[in-house]
Image: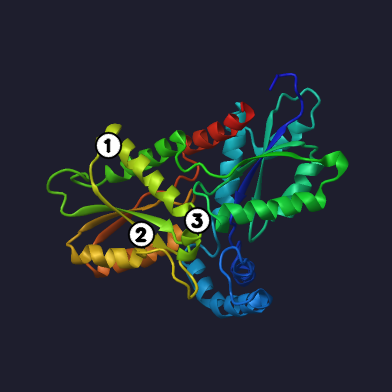
Amino acid sequence: MADTDKQATGVVLLNLGGPDSLQAVRPFLFNLFSDREIIRLGPAFLQTPIAWLISTLRSKKTEAMYRQIGGKSPILDITKAQAEALEKALNGESGVKSQELSSKLQTPDSKLHFKVYIGMRYWHPYFEDMVKNIISDGVKNLIVLSMYPHYSKATTGSSIDEFNKAVSKLQTPNSKLQTQYIDRWYDFPPYIDALAEIISEGLSEFSPPFGEEGQGGGTVLYSAHSLPQSFIDEGDPYLEHIKATISAVNSSLVTRHSLLFKWRLSFQSKTGPVKWLEPSTEEAIMELAREGCKNLFVVPISFVSDHIETLYEIDILYKNLAQKHGIILSRCRALNTTEKFIHAMRELVMGKTES
């Protein structure tokens, strides 16, 4: 894009969202369980009433979980921080706040090229609110980046469908949006580098480090968000993408970080009565305990930011379970706004501008 071009390109970050207060837990759960792309609750006409019943029954228990991690999901704050860091990186800016960037967008002499927006699937800010802001800002060209590296119809597929509905509803002939999508990036080299770096940093904190003789049964457990087995049976590529990421990360850890270790894959956060991917992370921890594992390093492989799955499920629930079975559990920190992850997102976006 030439320096004289005043029209910004919009970059959209699509994410799941999470309750921003304890009062938001029940309506958030209702929105989640109402989505038949994630889980089908009986025939279609019963989806909404069953979702209402499940969200009502589960809300108190879920509120108790959120109380233990600060009373809300951190995903909105983290996604905002990721968006701001990405916007700065794309524009070559440093130390510029988002409100200043928004002001610059309206300045005739501005050389701002990118403006980053965020939209959440199941809680505020919803996609419709985001699209209204995009149209109001006069942005015509969009690059939509799913914050799920591994494609699944339950996550990226559902989110893009809902985003497109919002665009179709709100755009006019004068505000028609030209959109490109980044819907999977599980093997993107800068993303793999970012993951390998934080895993290497985490493993180096063990004494002796993983891979050295005398470690005492250390194992890396890659814990991915689970998915109904039926999705995989019907051709969803999610599991294949997860395995490809792990293979690439392990290769990087061997060649670039000289790390060798035992590892396993497990799945967390299943819900509902259908068969989900196995083994569950709970089952994997108990199996490792029976095998004599003493040190366990959990890598939340399918997550790019902290939320209830990392802060409660791994840091509290699984850590306590591991302790009861004689295992010391540590967790790899999340990518969040690490420098290499922001660089990876920037490279993903720039790749679309050059295509």
- Secondary structure under badge 2? strand
* Mark 3 or mark 2, whichever is nearer to me: 3
Query: At which x and y percent is residue 301?
Result: 41, 50
User: Is 97 rendered above or below residue 218?
Assistant: above
Q: CA distance from mark 2 to mark 1?
A: 21 Å
Q: Which residue is mark 2?
A: 266
Please give left or right for residue 116 compared with residue 272 in the image. right
Q: Amino acid at mark 3?
A: Gly
Question: Which label's residue is closer to the chain start, 3 or 1?
Answer: 3
Please give left or right for residue 245 compared with residue 95 in the image. left
Q: Which residue is mark 1?
A: 254
**Who is closer to the viewer here, 97 or 185?**
185
Q: Amino acid at mark 2?
A: Ser
Please give left or right for residue 139 compared with residue 118 in the image. right
Q: Is residue 143 visible?
A: yes
Q: Amino acid at mark 1?
A: Val
Instruction: Name which residue lies at 35% across and 59% down.
Output: 266
Q: Quadrant of residue 176?
A: top right
Instruction: Name which residue lies at 54% across and 77% down.
Output: 58
Instruction: Name which residue lies at 54% across and 56% down.
Output: 74
Category of crowding for the residue at label 3, using alpha-carbon neighbours closer than 10 angstroms: few (below 14), some (14–19), many (at least 20) = few
Q: Which residue is mark 3?
A: 235
Question: Which label's residue is closer to the chain start, 2 or 1?
Answer: 1
Query: At which x and y percent is residue 330?
Result: 31, 55
Q: Is residue 95 visible?
A: no
